[in-house]
Image (cartoon, rainbow, N blue to C red):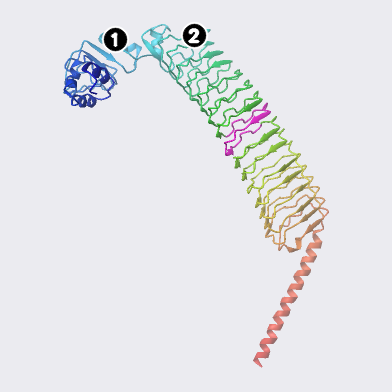
Amino acid sequence: MQQLDGYHIMIVSKYFSTILDFIKLQFVCKKFYNNMEKFHYNPVTLTNKTVSYFPHLETLHLYSRCSQTFGKKYIYLKRWDKPLLSEVKRSFYKTVVWFRVPYENTLDPAYATFDFKNVSCTPLTMQICNGEIPPIVNSLKKECFVNNTKTGLFRIPNHITSLGKKCFYSSKATSFSLPTTLKKIKYYCFSLCSLTSISIPDSVITIGNSCFYMCSNLVNVTLPESLYQLGDYFFNYCTSLKTVKIPPTVSVLCYKCFEHCSSLSSINIPNGVLSIEKSCFSYCTSLSQISLPNTVNNIGGGCFKGCSSLTSVELPLLIASLDSEVFQNCSKLPYIHIPGNVKVIKKHCFDCCGKLSQIEFCHSITAFEESCFNGCCALTELELPKTVIRISNNMFAHCLNIKNVILSDNIVEIPNYCFNQCSSLVEIHIPTKCEKVGEYSFSLCISLQHVSIPDSVTSIGNYCFYNCVELKSVTLPCKILKLGENCFESCSQLYNVQNLNKIGSFDKNAFVGCYSFDISQYTKQKKAEKGCSDKQKKGKKGENTSKKGNKKH
């Protein structure tokens, strides 16, 4: 501070943010005492109390709509209709307005001495200027060129710094020439317009959500290397878009960013990307392969859902789970390698992946959620990692060609519909720690012939083996507490059921339609056992009575 003279400290103080900074400076040393007297304009907002600190003020700068005008009436100020009763009145050579005002407001002769630095173009401006953007304007406000019928190239002047919400919504222009002064493009700016190609300059630092939403003719786009994310619905339904170069500065691909880009055949995701949000590439039906960099630590639910041409995926090493529906309906995906950090594969993750025939698991997975491999018709055999402790409903349902599944020994429940309609399943080893077999868990497994249920199982759900037409023999657990309703219904070839006599009672329809199984033998045996037990009870009663009689005598 000691090396700065009065002139240089004045230059520095232009960047002060409050009047207090100026006041404190005057107490630093004597040579700075008259600093505010050197200014002919106010570098900070002034009030009745502080205007006297700048005695040589000639030009008044208004920095916000709440600024005090000292007697000058300006209709665009927030408090213009409620002037301060005690407001100090001052006259100025010129008034400079820094906050945004519409172009039509600047045309009023009452503001002839006003210098407007931030003028916006509105739909009314377009009516006044016959569709031409005035030179004084530096931003286009919302819906400025909505439904504009001008075709071909639309040139945006070099003085424009911002494009507002829905600025060119449903415009007929096929291409745009954007200025290097442009910094902001707000959401829905070009949505539903007819553009076929666009190059966004590097000066642009933010682009709003849904910017190119439903630009169905867009083929080529060049993005600036200043973006840090591609927002929600960014290229959603850009059905002609074939390829996009994502800038290396981008770290997030947001919700439904490329959804329904049905012509997108390839895309290179740079190393800087950390997160790919929900449904980002869903229904990109031409996307055939994708490699995700190891920087990615999050893949959102439904990310590649419905990518019906996808044949190759390389997953990053850092992800801890595969979210819901990530690869649902990827009907041509033949192989997947699950990285080592994945602990949970969530519901419908590989649902209806009809060509998926090989899955390479890591040894850290602990749980599979609902319908994880539902409808994976190409799977023929599968061995789950030993670390798995939980599988869920419909996990292998409709896997029509699966013949053998090796389950982890730590699984305690076969949930509802787990193997429903696995029509090629020949055998299944139920883990020795399993306690429950759920409803419809093996229903319509028409190739299943023999089942041995371990003694750890205490409950077998309703319709568990419904319509297993090839099932011939079943070994039931010795300590079973519940045999569900219609448990073996329509198992027409079932003839041998071990340990059935150890079950106290079961639903009368448990074996309905089991034409090869003679339930009457079990009934007779049960009655005989009951008769013996009744006699034993009566004998014990008689003995007790005689003992009591002897005691009396």
Tell me the kind of residue under disc 1: Asp
Figure quadrant of residue 311: top right
Q: Main secondary structure of the magenta part?
A: loop
Highlighted range, magenta: 301-329
Q: Is residue 516 above or below residue 45?
A: below
- The tally of labels here is 2
Q: Is residue 243 left or right of residue 148?
A: right
Q: Is residue 95 above or below residue 530?
A: above
* C-beta proximity under 8 Å, tags 1 and 2: no
CA neighbours of label 1 inside 10 A, class few (<14), some (14 to 19), many (20+): few
Q: CA distance from mark 1 to mark 2?
A: 30 Å
Residue 507 image offset from top left, x and y in percent:
71, 57
Q: Quadrant of the C terminus?
A: bottom right
Residue that sits furthest to the bottom in the current view: 553
Q: Is residue 134 left or right of residue 445?
A: left
Q: Is residue 506 left or right of residue 364?
A: right
Residue 22 image offset from top left, x and y in percent:
22, 24
Residue 160 image offset from top left, x and y in percent:
41, 12
- Residue highlighted by disc 1: 108
- Residue highlighted by disc 2: 154
Q: Residue at x 21, y 21 (%)?
A: 83
The magenta stretch spans residue 322: yes
Residue 261 image offset from top left, x and y in percent:
60, 22
Q: Which residue is at the front of the view, 178 or 475? A: 178
Q: Secondary structure at mark 1?
A: loop
Q: Which of the two discs, 1 and 2, labels the residue nearer the N terminus?
A: 1
Figure quadrant of residue 393: top right
